[in-house]
Amino acid sequence: MVAALGALIGYTGVGALSVAGVTLAVGGSLTWAGIALNVAGSLALSTLTQPKLPEAAKPENIQVNNKSATGPRIGHVGRVLVGGNTVFHRAKNGVSYRVFAHGHGEVTSVLEIQLDSRPVPLLPNGDVDRDRPPYVRRRDGGLTIIPKVRVLSREGLVPSPHYDQITDVWPEWTADHRLDGLWTSMIRSESVSASRFRKIFPNGEPTLKVLAETAACFDPRTELSGFTENAALVINHYASLPDGLNRPDAFDVNDIIAAADICDRDVALAEGGTEKMFRLAGSYLLNEKPQDVLGRMLTACAGRVRLKPTGKIGLKVGAWSPPEFTLGFGDILEVQEVNPGPDLLDRYNQVVGRFTSQDLGYIEVDAEPWRDDVRVAEDGEVLTGPDKTLIMCPSHRQARQCMKIHMERDNPKQEVSLLCKPKALPAIYEDTIALDVPQLALVGDYEVARYSLSFEKGLLRAVALVLRKVDSAAYSLALAEQGSVQELPEPDNEEGVPLPENVVAGGAGVQAAANTFVAGISAGWAAPPSDALSPVVRYSKAGEDNWKDVPVNDEATSVEISGLQDGQAYDVSVAFVTPGGVEGEEVIVAGVVAVAVVDPPLPPTGLTVTDQGGGVALVELTASASASLWKTEVYRDGVLVGSIYSGPGAAISLSDSSSPGTFDWTARSVDVSIKDSATDAGPVTATIT
């Protein structure tokens, strides 16, 4: 590193080296200021516009549950949705315990727990708070809810409370197993019977994701630490971490304050509302090179770093500020080169990039490409540049703003190499300077791309600068330039399997023989929206949790449930299931009474009464024609005098010893479900002698 620094500034001796009063090297070893110069020089401008992004740090990879025994330790900043590495997994007495390590370091707060990618609210004790499956069992007709999953979290404190729920089962997991400094969760899952397993655990043991506000960052404006996604404060926080740059005082505090104020500006959104100008959120591996992580952060906020005269590192985010230093004609010793920027093989007029959308569930998505139509017209075709790694950028508007700035920086309209007098030395500490040299047609704002210092006999002889012209308009983004935000289709419900619609159920018997009926229930539902979904029908006695499956065709929209107890109330459940066995929520029709026959029987016909003398009456009639007929009842003055069991339409005669007098006779039919005919036959009045 010393040799590299010496080559940069033309220094090859021993002893002490200083620039602008800042000691950079002593006895061949770099001071912190020298390291800052080396770090700042390596991060400035475009040298880290394409920082490396490990696969393990991408959203789709940090959101999975893995069982790697040597999983990488991961740090987080901002708001993230993560899975975790399984550090404990054992089961006993039908209960499974898993502990996941989500990340290294303390987090501020857990916002949401997701099981199988669906948000699940928790009760204070960690049990899932739901009124129907999955993850809970229902008893007593749904009146009793028994949670089958519990989730507890530890936020990475030092020391951290251990999971005593595991210690109660396995004493070898002692109070010393605290996982200090690690953000973890424990998920406890109770087993269920095979018939209920797919309903309560549609994907087996549930996967776990946690949405959290992670690192607390120090804010020099308030001298307090707290959760934030402010890009300047996040960068300063990472620089201070022992697992980051490990330099708590690396950045100039005034630069951090100024940049933090810029990041906190409210920016109007094309779709309405506002958001902060520059935010950072994402993950990094602790075995990455810190400059790679810092490079990703800088790219996601169009930020740059510079050595300050104090030896600190200065920070600028992607907002325009007029240059404070100007070079004039009298400051220039030699104009070494003036060129129109990158040639046709190197320049581009369209840039693409991917960012992590918090609005779309914390997934990595493509931003709408940024295209400069003026440059396209000048170049005669669309030239697409390299992808920009904006993975720590949490919004589409911010991604588009950064893409616009990066295009301007990577494709300057003019690049100038100058050899200047020593009084140009302050330029090396600036991000942009102004050139006011109309004699050479060099007028405007320029970024300092590279520099070198030339010494002679220990004295600074000249300052060499490579400058790139920049248009301040690149640092603004009109509402119309924010582009179209991607949208995801809304699922039918939170499980992704739609609820059955128009579910109905009612008593309906089945005729098993000539005069034999079996009690049952008929259920129906609307066809599912997809042919890939099949119905699942179950029934249980009302108020009981003893569900039985009903065989049903994959394409059926109705089913007859037979063999039930006549007059008994039942609960009927209908749900849809995917080909992979994922069952959606059920619709329950409660308290359906099973019957053998639904409609009442027809009344008997042809009722006549004839006096037989001796106080006896002959009652004659024809039995009901209803196939469900069980018996015919004959009444005299409202008193039952005979029950005749016959087939439908049979001729019936009954001798009634009424004794002498005048009486009224009626008759009615009773079916196999003990329902009377709606009307009676009669009355027929007769006088008996």
Image (cartoon, rainbow, N blue to C red):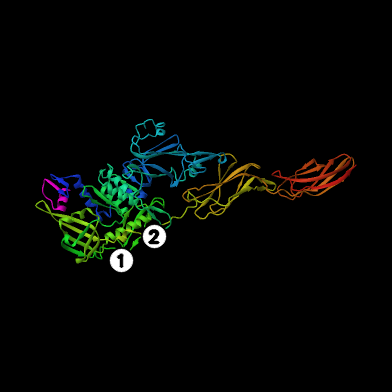
Which residues make up the magenta segment? 1-17
Front one among 374 and 285: 374
Front one among 458 and 92: 458
- Sequence-earlier tag: 2 or 1: 1
Closer to us: mark 2 or mark 1? 2
The stretch drawn in magenta includes residue 264: no
- As shown in the figure, which amino acid type bears the numbered disc 1? Arg
Judging by the rendered image, the residue that carries numbered circle 1 is: 375
Residue 150 falls left or right of residue 387: right
Front one among 276 and 181: 276
Image quadrant where one finds the C terminus: top right
Residue 382 falls left or right of residue 597: left
Location of residue 151 in the rendering, given as x and y in whole percent from the top left corner: 43, 39
Q: Is residue 408 visible?
A: yes
Give the number of the disc on residue 222.
none
Residue projecting furthest to the top: 171
Location of residue 543 in the rendering, given as x and y in whole percent from the top left corner: 59, 39
Where 41 falls versus 225 (above or below)? below
Q: Is residue 54 visible?
A: no
Q: How dense is the environment of label 2, judged by Cα within 10 Å: few (below 14), some, or many (20 and up)? A: some
Report if the CB atoms under discs 2 and 1 are less than 8 Å apart: no
Which structural element holds mark 2?
helix
The stretch drawn in magenta includes residue 10: yes
- As shown in the figure, which amino acid type bears the numbered disc 2? Leu
Location of residue 107 in the rendering, given as x and y in whole percent from the top left corner: 36, 41
Give the number of the disc on residue 479.
2
